[in-house]
Image (spheres, coloured by chain):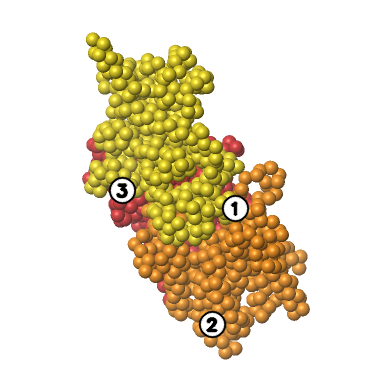
Chain colours: A red, B orange, C yellow
Amino acid sequence: MVSYLRKYRAITLCVILTALIIISSIYSLSAGSIKISFEDVKKYIWEGTTGNVIKDKIISKLRVLRTIGAIIAGMAIALAGILMQGYFRNPLADPYLTGVASGASLGVVLYIFTSILFGFGIPHNIWGRIIAAYIGSLITMFIVINIARAVKQISTLLICGIMVGSIVYGFTNVIVYMGDYIGEEDMSKLSEYLMWGMGSVSNLTSLQIKIMAIILIPISILSIIFLSKDLDANLLGEKYAISVGVDIKKLKTKLILLSCILTATVVAFTGPIAFIGIMCPILARMLCGTSKHLYVMPVTALLGSLFLLVADILVRPGVVIPSSSNVLGLSCPLSIIGAPIAILIYLKIRKLGI
Amino acid sequence: MKKRAVAVILILLILSIVLPIVGLYIGGNAKSIDYDDVTNFILKGTTGDKFKDYILKESRLPPILGAIIVGLSLSGAGLMLQTLFRNLLASPYTTGITSGVLLTAALVIFIDSISGLLDAIAPDYTSKLLIAGWIGGVFAIVMLLIIAYRIQEANGVIIVALLFSYFFGGVRDYLIANAELIQIQEYWEFIIGSLTRIRMKDILPMTVCSIIFVIGALFLIKSLNALLFGEKYAKSFGLNIKKTRILILFFASFITGAIIPFTGLIAFIGLLAPYLARPLIKTSDHRYLMPTSMLLGVVLMVLCHIVSLKYYVPLHYIYGIERPASPLPIGSVLDILGGLLVIYLVYKGEKKIRLD
Amino acid sequence: MKKMLFIFLILCILPISLGFKIGDINHDDSIDISDVVYLFKHRDVPLEEGDINCDNSVDIADVVYLFRNYDKFREPVVFAKNFQLEPHWDEGYCIVTDADGKKFVILKEGAKNPNIPNAIVMKAPLKRVVTGDQILLGTAYVTKDNNVVDSIKAMFHLSSVAPKYKEEFPILYERYKNGEVLDVGKWANPNYDVIVNVSPQIVFIYKFRYTEQTKEKLDELGITYARTGAYWEDTFMGKTEWTKFFAAFYGDNDYKKVEDYLQNTWKERNDILRKVYKINNYPKVAIFYWSSTKGPYVWGAQNYRPKWVNMIKGEYIFNDMPGTGGNYIDKETFYERAMNADVVILHTMGRNISTKEQLLKLNPDFANFKAFKTGRFYCMPPDNSKREVLDPAGIMLDYAKAIHPEVFGGDTKYLIKIEP
């Protein structure tokens, strides 16, 4: 009886969230520094054109891409977060604990500030930066996973992950510090690196989004379908999981590998996206009232897409921030709005004594 | 056990006197100053050439003194925070203190009207940053104390502090997105930890603050030892938990807010020194652990300072390059070396557990 | 009759010398081997025309120099290395190649398309432009052509550029204030909505790694763009020559005006070189940027400012640092060399440092510099980047005045002298 209620609750949540995402997408098509009215957006959706070539271009080549990018990236990062939280059995784990973000930063910084990478055959265009970020995060991931195999305790792995992240971050700072970026035009190098570090979906081209979709969507769906049961068992403790017949070693490898691939892909294209990886799983659990992963994971994914979509709408000048401002990075609205919400939730949880 | 601890402390004490002197010899790249000059400087107070004196006194000496001060204070602060939160990852950085300092520094750098407000108190740029840093540190202290008062459990304070640092980071990111390029550069350079911008006249306030901090730390040793048993036991020993918590947080934030405006973020030492000190003396008694951490902090800082200035010597020797090299930021050197050390220790520790 | 002939001759010569091109000794409007022959036979040409190698005399060395270089002198682009021009204005078009190697064919009004393969066709003058390169404003200033400023519909970094050029282009500042010209934002995260809304004929962006993402996005949006690379030039003249690149997009009138302007700048530069030819002392010169947090930043010896200093007989103290880039160095090495330098030119990166107090606030150690005590400590003006675009000859002369006041006089036009 209770499980039926939970199921219906989860399904209702999914339906509400999907509706919210659709509404936000439509709003996203119309919001921005150049205002496009809802009438025009409706015309575009039904007839394929608004009648004005410029507005068509803005919607189809800019806004549609951003919206899809935000939905896919948000979904992937949120799922990566819940996979990591399952692995560490700690609700404070985030997808960057394996040093993915610092590895990607190192790759990007090597690409922006030095010419070392070009000797290895990395191309001289934006794919170079994406590939550099990917390779950086994969190498760091590889190191941390190998450490994970060699240690028994979870807390040791946590420390090692943080240390590897610090080492890589140290190298990144050294390269930027010694980089040649003084000179009126050069200073944009530093600005580019910092803005990349805040995350953004506004610069993606359709080819990049297609690649993101091809990698991320199948992995997300497959992990929801196949890993939920094992994650449930794992939550109750390692010994319990083994006794129910879960192959712990294989599960752990799968978890960390999938989470890293999801995170690395998102970070390579958009830059590190803060907050969603931690917040959405916690919120999803609270909303569903249960920890059963078959219900919580889809809700997490939908929450992730919704939050990133709303954040992407908020960074456009003219919507909330003054239109004389520059385009912000995604970390701004996520942190400024996400952190107070998180504090409130945390205080509420404590009051309830959970 | 005691003997080993005392021996280790003595060794570290000797090292922390010898290494700074070595640092004076090789801690700089001026080609015209050689070892005899430095010896004269130490023994007689002058090398005979006003020009060389100036370089030694203003350029080479302050960073070494700064390394000693930073090593002492931040390691002690880190140890206190780790004991309070019973979490090996606690440090001035993870408790959000540095976030407050960075936020006010960013406000002063990026928003001209705010830096204009400080014109009355602080005429020049560095003292403006200093006062802003103080205010940020005090702000973070106040928030931490309010939270510490309302939340009973220690780990809760860390979580909330972390979330506050996220929030401050978001505000900073907004400023960065809209700032002029040169302001971004100034801000970034401010936060990267480096000892080279310390001047002789900064050493005095820094020393005063560290002396206050060291006295406070020594007083707190008893309470820290009591806290080791857990808050409930400590209460039963008659320890006023709330007061101790407030005192620890106050001293840690006080010294962090006093040092960061001069050097930038060198938070890793607060994590590293206590972590390395524990296996060295094999006891958690703060009567030995506190001096060990502090002295180990001094040794590490001076070593890393020398490395950051002289790292290029083997590279240039192999490749035969003659051009002057840029110094490394000491914060990053600490990150790299410290991270490697910790991983090695952790790995060795794990091996031991498995062999047992 | 004789009088009239005399006047007629003078009238014939005057207009020709106004539009004189360096290297065109025999005034036949082209630079070729006949000029070499002419110079060989007639040594009595004026100094500023005949002294090509700037050694203060017209002699056989000039003939040899002209012989070696007349090919280069007659090219449309002499000093700049990162773009090319092939003007065929008589046939009505001009081929422009940008820093990426992309070809553009600029057609005059009513001219026929010559159908150059792989080139993008554009009609001069441009009417809708988005620019990220300030040198376009330099072109506008030199040609005094309102079309250039009117065609700018959006700009990168507008909020910092428009106030900087308020004096020279008040109309741009006005349009920025009332929203007629829009701000695209920063290079790292441009606001593409604005660019698409303006529907530009071309977008000018810098050739840097940080514009590669912009390139892909503009390709996808189907907007033409050209990448400019004045930053990569290693001489003052090379950087200034980029004004010709932009001028070509606005037709042959603007092109000719910029051509004349460049020849004049070249002449003034040669003038400076001639005057320093006889000097035998090389004062030590330090050019650097001082960061309040990281200390001294110095450039390599091939960067365009140290290069110019070395050309006008100054000894740049870091001549052993190769390359055109720069890096931070440690304080001790820097102080060792810079404290004893005779002349110091401090890069202020847009800040205003004009008094002793402001300078010592930045770094009290400057009071011990020899250049400070002897009153030869100069700071670049806050609008230095603007001046280098609009009046490079003046800036070059300023450096000469700072380094050799005994020859040029000591009052610099733009560099700010700090009184000790």
Marks 2 and 3, how far apart at CA: 55 Å
Q: Can residue B51 be spotted in the picture? A: yes
Q: Residue at x 55, y 78 (%)?
A: B212
For residue C336, the mark is 1
Name the amino acid type tagged 3: Pro
| Above-or-below relation of B219 to C250 | below
**Residue B46 at what x, y percent from top left?**
65, 64
User: Which residue extends farthest front?
Assistant: C2
Q: Residues within 10 Å of mark 3 (few under 14, many from 20)?
A: some
For residue B244, the mark is 2
Name the amino acid type tagged 1: Glu
| Above-or-below relation of B132 to B323 | below
User: Which residue extends farthest top?
Assistant: C1
Whether tag 1 and tag 2 are in contact, CB under 8 A, the answer is no
Q: Is A244 left or right of B9, judged from the image as shown?
A: left
Asked if marks 1 and 3 fall on the same chain, the answer is yes
Name the amino acid type tagged 2: Thr
Q: Residues within 10 Å of mark 2 (few under 14, many from 20)?
A: some
Q: Find residue C127 and report its image quarter.
A: top left
Q: Can residue C208 be spotted in the picture? A: no
Q: Residue at x 39, y 19 (%)?
A: C116
Tell me the residue that label 3 is attached to: C163
To which chain does the residue with label 1 belong? C
Earlier residue among tags 1 and 3: 3
**Residue B311 at what x, y percent from top left?**
66, 53
Q: Which secondary structure lies at badge 1?
A: helix
**Residue A218 at what x, y percent from top left?**
49, 46
